[in-house]
Amino acid sequence: MGHTVSGIRIYSNADSYQGLFGQTGTDACIQGIILTDARITGYANTGGIAGSNGGTLSHNRVIGAVVAATTDNNNGAICGANSGTLENNYYHDCTVAGVENATGKGCNNDDVDDNNGAMPAFLVTPGEGITIQTPMADDLGFSYDSDGDGQDENYWRKGAQLILANQFANVPEGYTSSTITVTKTANGIDITSNALNGTTLTVPTADVTVTVTLTPIPWSGTGTRDDPWVISYASQLDLLAQRVNSATGDYEDYGNRGKYYYKYKGKYFVLGADITYNHDDDANDAVYASNYTAIGCDFGNQVCFFSGHFDGRGHTVSGIRIYKGAYLASINQGLFGKSSGNIRGITLADARITGYYNTGGIVGHNERGTISDCHIAADVYIHAAQSGADYHGGIVGENGGTIDQCTSAATLTIADADNSYCYGGIAGDNYGTLRDNLAIGATVPAAADNSYGAICGMSDGGTLENNYYHACTVAGTENATSVGCNKADVTDGAEPGIILYDHSSRTDINSSILTKVGNVAVPRVAIAGRTLYQDGDWNTLCLPFDVALAGSPLEGATVMELDNREGSGTGFDATTGILTLNFVDISPSGEQVGLMTAGRPYIVKWPSSIARTISSTDDWHNFAADVAGGNTYEGKVVRLADDIEVSEMVGTSEHKFKGTFDGQGHTLTLNDLSASGEACAPFRYVEGATIANLHTTGSVIADKNNDSKFRSGLVGQSDGNTTILNSWSMSVDFPTPG
């Protein structure tokens, strides 16, 4: 009872009554047989269990059999002909008379409904969140371990009524509704409409899968800078990945390189809360199930970038698990997979990210994007899946953009150090810019050809500025030194540093940071997350350590200490309600040359070299008019503080722009720039200028006359020693008027 007969072969085209049993008499009773992998061919009266039944066939199952009569008379998966009793006999995945996955072929070219005499049965596979509450019974189907894993699968007869339980009936946080969906397992065709009524499933004539579809709460906001889309739930972050990773919408066709989709360009997102992903394991392995999909992907001929603005606003994303091992499916892994956008203000914690190449904590591959003020906690592990897994970094795997003021305490592991390249605490490989970053307590393994470092594994063609590391374990050596990049230090680029560590929030750099834009030095000091600019404004400052001004990053600034000496005038007048604070100058030109003392309040400012800050189209118009009027801005800095749209050009043949323009990673959208003569670009005429950290997109219109030349997405005509740094034009069109 319940034993299996498998592998029988009967090829007897000239003989009738073929089956496991050819004919059964009135006293015969055959029950409890499981017949699998059978091939039975006869002349007529051909069946799986019996060619012709005159007795009783009960509780038999035929699975995966091929049955055929050459005369096409009296075929059946159970029996060819019947004059006896049939009850609770089922068949599944059988080919009868040439019909694959046959139904209506139980006995004598038909099914026998009475007592479930000869009926088809089908697999119903419940997905996550679904359970089948209806218990299996003889009149509903049968159970059988078809795949040999020790677990029986339930095969339900056609038309059986199954009660389903949906564990998401109470919609979980981050979702608006849950819907049960039934699809055919073989071809994915949705058959919900004719199979499902509420939570009652009528078993159709096909193997099916039952799943729950959860609808995420829509993002609030409109996606503008002033009203960004707000993401507060894991479901909403997953929705962003789903939409970015779909190869739909506008794209740029790069021929053999494939189609590039730049998603959400010019759109703004923010995190509205900390986001935590639930997980069951802490392993670093590709065999486990992932709970997260990176935002942005590369499928070879279809590449999807996140190209918008994403501000974490200091919130933390934790609990993500990415376990990838296969080639294309495992490249570009991280919170974001492929990005050309601006990402800032995110902390990643409690994460396990396993990938092939281009694997990082924040972004797998940063292509011309900017990542700033992002932080990787000490419980983040970035793991190589296999040999040849190149470009792994704490912040970014492969960097072709800018990484600025980020910290990483990530642990990187490697599968094959002899055949895997470029592992770094901040970036694996850098051909962009790493500036003002800190690796603290990071662990970086040795990699092939010494391409490893506490800051980056390799920086071939890239720029390193003021990056520091502290208490890092590199190639197995704790508190390693001389291993900033490519197993060596880079002066002012990747070197050890003494820092302060605020465990309750994050690590900050408290050492000198000097950014040089063109020939104008703009000192910046990052202290407790703040940045002090050389813009002529006063800043308040109170440090937890002493600083001697001479030779410090504050040298050259005016530094004034609160004067609370007797008779200084500092104090509160209870009669008038006036608080008076007087300060004394302690800078080298002041009354007291000396020390900034820990715990005392100071005010600090530098003389301003910032001549103009541009935040709007109107600001750009005024800037262009100022240059045209003769202000060349030579020796001065103009900064762009936001992405803006422009339709005017800066500089004329008589009055060229000669200063430094720092785009700060922002984008100028060119709104059909046009000129009646030669040279057409946002910076039409420049001389000895510096254009830095600027991105452009949009269109530059050609004129129909012969002087229509020197068109560009950045600079039209340049005289003298003009420098362009870390700037590029993205998708700039040059249409010619008809």
Image (spheres, grey):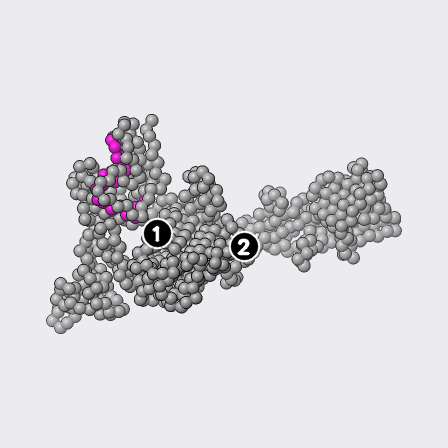
User: What residue does disc 1 label?
Assistant: 462
Residue pictured at 35% horizontal, 46% vertical: 224
> Compared to 593, does 224 lie above or below?
above
Circle 1 sits in a helix, a strand or a loop, which is it?
A: loop
Left or right of residue 483: residue 692: left
Three-letter code for the amino acid on which mark 2 is drawn: Phe
User: How crowded is the residue under tag 1: few (<14 C-alpha within 10 Å), some, or many (20+)?
Assistant: some
Q: Is residue 231 visible?
A: no
The outermost residue toward the front is 449
In the rendering, at what x and y percent does residue 17 appear?
A: 84, 43
Decide which of 308, 209 is in the foreground and name it: 308
Q: Which residue is mark 2?
A: 168
**Left or right of residue 46, residue 428 in this image:** left
Q: Position of residue 84 (x, y in %)?
A: 84, 47
- Residue at mark 1 to residue at mark 2: CA–CA distance: 50 Å
Q: Which residues are magenta?
A: 672-695
Of the residues shown, which amino acid type is indicated by label 1?
Gly
Task: Write the residue at 68% across / 56% down.
Answer: 148
Q: Quadrant of the C terminus?
A: top left
Could you tell me which residue is drawn at 19 percent across and 52 percent down?
609
Q: Position of residue 211 (x, y in %)?
A: 57, 50
Compared across the picture, whether 308 is left or right of 535 comes to right
Q: Is residue 675 magenta?
A: yes
Residue shown at 29% from the left, 35% from the top: 711
Tell me the quarter of the picture where residue 608 sits. bottom left
User: Which quadrant is the N terminus positioned in?
Assistant: bottom right
Res 583 → quadrant: bottom left
